[in-house]
Image (cartoon, rainbow, N blue to C red):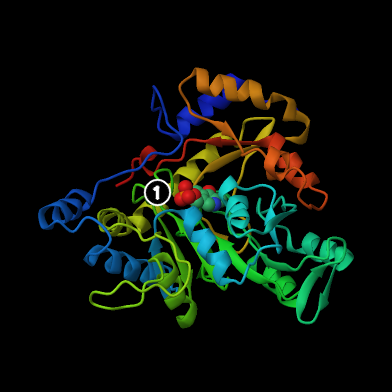
Amino acid sequence: MAAPDSNAVIAALRAAVLGRQGNIPLHEPWFIGNEWGYVKDCLDTGWVSSAGKYVDRFEASLSGYTGARHAIAVVNGTAALHICLKLAGVQPGDEVLIPALTFIATANAVSYCGATPHFVDSAYATLGLDPAKLYDYLADIAEVRGGMCVNRKSGATIRAVVPMHTFGHPVEIESLLEVAGGFRLEVVEDAAESLGSVYKGRHTGTFGKVSALSFNGNKVITTGGGGAVLTNDDHLAKHAKHLTTTARLPHQWSFIHDEVGYNYRLPNINAALGCAQIEQLSEFVRRKRELAAAYRNAFFGVSGLVFFTEPAGACSNYWLNALMLDQASTGCRDGLLDAFNAHGIMARPVWSLMHRLPMYQNCPRMPLEVAEDLERRLINIPSSPFLVATP
Ligand SMILES: *Cc1c(COP(=O)(O)O)cnc(C)c1O
């Protein structure tokens, strides 16, 4: 197999985005709906902060779109993950299984709970957590004792597993739920990248006990900064709202708080942006899927790499498009990244794997050969929904 020729790769990319010249950012927000109107309404009425109608409305829209019974809007995706882990019962001293190939927020949220991230390998087909490999690993190092999963080596309780739907592509969530059930692990989905992605007809973020979404500026829809907790459990939803609003007991004028809560509530002005953005979510996802199809065609004839496509059984939002270098071409990654960026095309490698970072290098982990291979081979390319012009 020939190594990829950077001129051919760049020509293919420009062809897919209809010959668009000049700088192409990786992912930009797009405000073409009711954003101005809703934000202006907040300013006109003075309802910009911690109360107002847009928070409730945004939560109802999220719940309606995903099919989750409840959505609780919060300040960002990391805060959503933090609350999800607390709701799943993660306690100081626990271990939480997370993929080594993820954005730092997944690991940090575990740390905020006083728990230790325990790194798990990925699958080639999904880029996410590999349930079969996880099963073999847990069978080897863990046992169920008193209804809990215990790491035989560290003696710690392994409380939960956090699958992350990488670049929007759903993990094999049904198999994972089975493995988690067998080992008495709670499942918390990190669906920060996958709003609008569906696995066997069901939205990601509705499989776990609780799930986290993000509306950061580079995500499928944005509220500036923002996130949400999704759950089908009425009791957990109530507790999520309580925890994220300083755990204050409802009362007209007194300030009584019954546990250590957090000031994680999404401001009304951000929720207003979210209400306008979610009205366009289906269209954004349609366009992103169309862009992915154009990339797939354009890169078909380019040697040395493939365009990564959604796994079987899934309908992905293609949040971030990715090229995967052939095994023989891994040495070309940085040269290609230089060439892209020199041509104004923003491309980047996948995140540094969590176990390479100084604060996480001594955390427990299984052999991570697939994640390490993917790290050398993946390149993210421009993915904004406006890159395809369609009627
Ligand atoms: C974006 C993201 C988050 C949350 O990020 P925030 O910037 O805090 O909203 C969490 N996990 C993953 C995998 C993400 O990509």
Q: Is residue 256 left or right of residue 369?
A: left
Element type at mark 1 = helix
Residue at the spot 80% in from the left edge and 70% down from the top edge: 150
Percent across and percent down for residue 13 are 50, 30
Residue at x-position 38% and y-position 28%? 20
Point out the image quarter for the N terminus. Answer: top right
Q: Residue 5 appears at what percent x and percent y?
A: 64, 21
The residue singled out by tag 1 in the image is 287
Q: Residues within 10 Å of mark 1 (few under 14, many from 20)?
A: many
The picture quadrant where one finds residue 351 is: top right
Camera-side residue of 260 and 12 = 260
Is residue 197 something that shows in the picture? no
Depicted 218 relative to depicted 142: above or below: above
Q: Position of residue 355 (x, y in %)?
A: 73, 44
Residue 234 is left or right of residue 181, and the answer is left
Q: How many marks?
A: 1
Q: Residue at x 56, y 37 (%)?
A: 380
**Is residue 27 at least partly visible in the picture?**
yes
Q: Disc 1 marks which amino acid?
A: Arg
Please indicate whether residue 257 sits to the left or right of residue 79 in the image.
Answer: left
Which residue: 76% across, 50% down?
Answer: 363
Outermost left residue: 44
Residue at mark 1: C-beta within 8 A of ligand 1: no
